[in-house]
Image: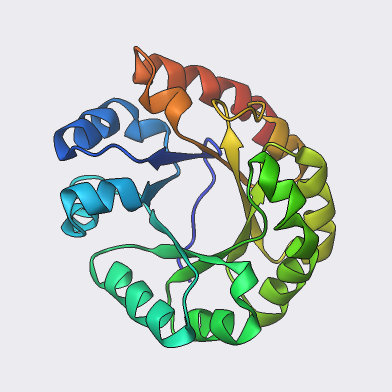
Amino acid sequence: MVKINRETGIILAIDAQNKEKIFKILDNTYSYVDALKIGFPSVLSCGIDVISDIKNNFSLPIIADFKLSDIPVINKIIAEKAFNYGADAVTVQGFIGPDALRLCIDNADRKSVFVITEFTHADGATYTQLISEDVAQIAKDLGATGIQAPGTRPERIKLLRNIVGDKLIIIACGIGTQGGEIGGAIKAGADFEIIGRSITDSDNPSIKIKTIAEILNKLIQ
């Protein structure tokens, strides 16, 4: 299992579709980043070897945000590809059920698996929230590294933390542009806040992330 050391509490979400832009963003932010979450827009635009390129140039843990949601064998293949190209962790949808989750977790081989409990947008509260508490319990029982919880609904983070206890890491998305308050998820019990467009689309990412880090520093020290 790959350990993410909490220095700032920031996991930077990257979805830029140009490798030059990705590297420019990281050049200006990586010193404040505890881990990097890279999604399909970047991988599909730049190729999966963008993960290797980032890994070779920046000493950051990388979460491949692939939201695995297929049958067990396909999830296993995709996760292995991500790990082979340098990813330290993958995200997996909790709604696929315990058998598919178990295969991902059991085959991670010193890598990490974060199980997504519920989505951050309004429909997430309507649909995936209905099973998210069961998903959190399954993730705990199967020995996942952690869960991904909605930073747009801090009250849900508190509830999910009560389920998983201190054994699992909680990473919270939806912070900033999507409406989650900076620091709100950590106050509610998350270990890290996933922040993307608020930083990557700002006029000055280095100043923006420094300001955020200063806010979070007061909460995690």
Residue 14, located in which quarter of the rendered image? top left
Q: Is residue 45 visible?
A: yes
Q: Closest to the observer: 140 or 149?
A: 149
Residue plotted at (48% across, 85% down): 72
Q: From this view, report whether residue 207 is shown above or below residue 64.
A: above
Q: From this view, report whether residue 209 is shown above or below residue 73.
A: above
Taking 83 as reference, is 194 left or right?
Answer: right
Residue plotted at (29% across, 37% down): 16
The percent coordinates of residue 5 (x first, y second) are 50, 50
The percent coordinates of residue 215 (x first, y second) are 61, 22
Q: From this view, report whether residue 190 is shown above or below residue 168.
A: above
Which corner quadrant holds the C terminus?
A: top right
Residue plotted at (23% across, 66% down): 85
Taking 156 as reference, is 112 left or right?
Answer: left
Residue plotted at (64% across, 47% down): 191
Taking 131 as reference, is 45 left or right?
Answer: left
The percent coordinates of residue 78 (x first, y second) are 34, 74
Taking 191 as reference, is 61 left or right?
Answer: left
Q: Is residue 109 visible?
A: no
